[in-house]
């Protein structure tokens, strides 16, 4: 069932006029939806408790989200509750739905608070929605006791109170204390046309590094070809298939193709590497002698 409404005001009016369900009627509707997938029963159940969803959505207006969006998220939480509700457990639907409604709204608020993900664990979510309240209470208690808490002491007390690591409190303070800014915004009115993105360091390789990297790769390729030239055709084939392919072949598959045992292929591979190592060592001595 989709939530179709033009404004939160009109939906609120309709919700206030919806029927109030007694426990017996609520139970019958829940059974009809669970056992018979009766959409009319689901519709009555959702409409009856939409006022509860709207009431909970209104408590999150201080986070800056549009009320219309909050109500829609609350409605989605209400429908999830109806989908998962088990009337055999002897719990009122409204009691069960509160958790799903709150969870849906909180997830929406945290997703839209910042482009940077604010938190994902349950402890971080608890900190997000309780940090300011806990901090205000701790400040009142400290003031009444005549104690002055510095910033670090306050963070430690909040971490203990909420039951989260200190680093989470420090991270959440930064998230809640700042806001998102565009990198294309100008740094100041004095810097004509200069945007913040222009001040970011270019982390790509510089021209000198690129030239050195190309030179080193060319040298390595030359040495590799030289080392391979010291091998016979079968040894080159084994080295190429075992070490130079993106998907290296197994000793067993090479043995089947060459009609050799897996152990014999391994011995040929080891011998080939020994030849290549000897060739590279000889080349390095020549290079060092030339440089000397």
Image (cartoon, rainbow, N blue to C red):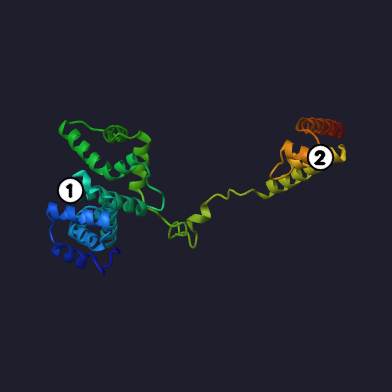
Report, in whole angstroms, how far the alpha carbon at label 2 lies from the one at label 1.
74 Å
Specify whether 115 is left or right of 90: right
Q: Position of residue 62 (x, y in %)?
A: 25, 53
Q: Which residue is mark 1?
A: 92
Seen at 79% across and 30% down, the residue is 267
Q: Position of residue 8 (x, y in %)?
A: 23, 64
Q: Position of residue 291 (x, y in %)?
A: 84, 34
Seen at 17% across and 31% down, the residue is 146
> Which quadrant is the C terminus positioned in?
top right
Specify the label residue 258 is tagged with. 2
Residue 244 appears in view: yes
Mark nearer the N terminus (2 vs 1): 1
> Residue 73 lies in what quarter of the image?
bottom left
Residue situated furthest bottom in the rendering: 6
What secondary structure is found at the residue carrying circle 1? loop
Q: Nearer the viewer, residue 162 or 206?
A: 162
């Amino acid at each position: 069932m989709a939530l179709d409404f033009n404004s939160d005001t009109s939906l609120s009016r309709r919700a206030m006029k919806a029927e109030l369900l007694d426990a017996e009627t609520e139970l019958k509707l829940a059974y009809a939806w669970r056992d018979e997938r009766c959409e009319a029963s689901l519709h009555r159940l959702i409409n009856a408790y939409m006022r509860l969803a709207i009431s909970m959505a209104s408590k999150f207006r201080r986070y800056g989200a549009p009320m219309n969006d909050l109500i829609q998220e609350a409605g989605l939480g209400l429908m999830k509750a109806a989908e998962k509700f088990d009337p055999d457990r002897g719990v009122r639907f409204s009691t069960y739905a509160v958790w799903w409604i709150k969870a849906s709204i909180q997830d929406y608020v945290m997703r839209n608070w910042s482009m940077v993900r604010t938190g994902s664990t349950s402890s971080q979510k608890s900190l997000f929605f309780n940090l300011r309240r806990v901090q205000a209470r701790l400040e009142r208690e400290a003031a009444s006791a005549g104690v002055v808490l510095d910033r670090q002491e306050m963070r430690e007390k909040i971490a203990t109170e909420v039951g989260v690591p200190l680093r989470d409190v420090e991270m959440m303070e930064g998230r809640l204390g700042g806001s998102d800014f565009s990198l294309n915004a100008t740094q100041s009115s004095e810097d004509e046309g200069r945007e913040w993105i222009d001040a970011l360091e270019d982390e790509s390789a510089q021209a000198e590094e690129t030239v050195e990297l190309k030179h080193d790769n060319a040298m390595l390729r030359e040495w590799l070809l030289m080392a391979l030239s010291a091998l016979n055709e079968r040894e080159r084939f084994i080295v190429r298939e075992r070490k130079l392919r993106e998907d290296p072949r197994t000793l067993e598959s090479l043995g089947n193709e060459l009609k050799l045992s897996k152990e014999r292929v391994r011995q040929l591979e080891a011998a080939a590497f020994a030849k290549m190592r000897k060739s590279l060592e000889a080349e390095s001595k020549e290079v060092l002698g030339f440089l000397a």
